Image (cartoon, rainbow, N blue to C red):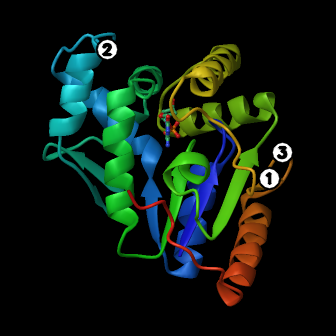
Amino acid sequence: MIITIDGPAGAGKSTAARMLAERLGFEFLDTGAMYRAVAWACVDRNIDLTDSAAVTETASTIAIHFEEDRIVCNGRDVTVEIRSPEASHAASIVAAVPGVRLEMVRLQRESASECDCVTEGRDQGSEVFPNAECKFFLTADPQERAERRLLELQNRGQSRSLEEVLSQIVDRDERDCTRDIGPLVMAEDAVQVDTSGRTIDEVVDFLENTSRERLDNPNRTHAWPRP
Ligand code: DC
């Protein structure tokens, strides 16, 4: 079974997806971390992020592995590095490169092919797994999303102003929503969940109950169209 969780930055997707996967005993796939890893590898190799061919080449040749909640890129643990605001900015640029998306979608489908999986990102329900059994789209008020991101950064010892974080979030939403391939869009059959003012437990309880109803009444087709 595949459960997709999409939505804009700071809507609480990662935490909710991780907790949901744990409660259901499913694997968890953090697809944003994959785009972040590609961006990290490009910066590490001094590749110009506007050079689509070089960025695509990097995406096709790097080795990305998840080890528990760590992400390893080309043998190096980049879990912390890929979470900086600079890495977020770089990730949103490489994520708009069509060749990068093709490669990441291929890897995502491969990762989910042999397991029950909660997968989280922007295009999981709309593009990558259009036939997923259960789809959610998480949203939240931009101000609240910025406050959550700020807290996350502060917990990692990175200081930023709320205004700066809010403006980066609005900027990133704009890039994510307007790119030609795999834009941030709610799948028609997704359940929209506004997480504003809700605790993470309230959100995950709702996701879990809805998912279990689907598990009990499966309408199984293959999670993505076969070529
Ligand atoms: O969810 P995140 O903030 O870690 O995502 C990092 C960037 O990658 C963000 O700009 C959106 C992009 N992304 C994407 O385009 N498609 C996905 N499936 C996941 C993330």
Q: Which residue is denoted by mark 2 in the rendering?
A: 49
The number of discs equals 3
212, 226: nearer the viewer: 226
Q: Residues within 10 Å of mark 3 (few under 14, many from 20)?
A: some
Q: Is residue 128 left or right of residue 218?
A: left
199, 21: nearer the viewer: 21
Pointer 3 or 2: first along the chain:
2
CA gap, disc 3 and disc 2? 34 Å
Q: Secondary structure at mark 2?
A: loop
Pointer 1 or 2: first along the chain:
2
**In the picture, residue 61 is in which quadrant?**
top left
Q: Is residue 177 left or right of residue 69?
A: right
The answer to the question of whether label 1 and label 2 lie on touching residues, with beta carbons closer than 8 A, is no
Q: Secondary structure at mark 1?
A: strand
Q: Position of residue 1 (x, y in %)?
A: 53, 76
The answer to the question of whether label 3 and label 2 lie on touching residues, with beta carbons closer than 8 A, is no
Task: Give me the residue at 58% from left, 20% from top.
Answer: 175
Can residue 79 be spotted in the picture? no
Q: Which mark is residue 112?
A: none
Q: Secondary structure at mark 3?
A: loop
Q: Which residue is denoted by mark 1 in the rendering?
A: 192
The amino acid on which the numbered mark 3 sits, given as a three-letter code, is: Ser
Can residue 214 be spotted in the picture? yes
The amino acid on which the numbered mark 2 sits, given as a three-letter code, is: Leu
Distance from mark 1 CB to nearest ligand 1 atom below 8 Å: no
The amino acid on which the numbered mark 1 sits, given as a three-letter code, is: Gln
203 w.r.t. 139: above or below: below
Q: Which residue is denoted by mark 3 in the rendering?
A: 196
Q: Is residue 2 left or right of residue 65?
A: right
| Front position among marks 3 and 1 | 1
Q: Position of residue 65 (x, y in %)?
A: 25, 54
Q: Position of residue 41 (x, y in %)?
A: 22, 29
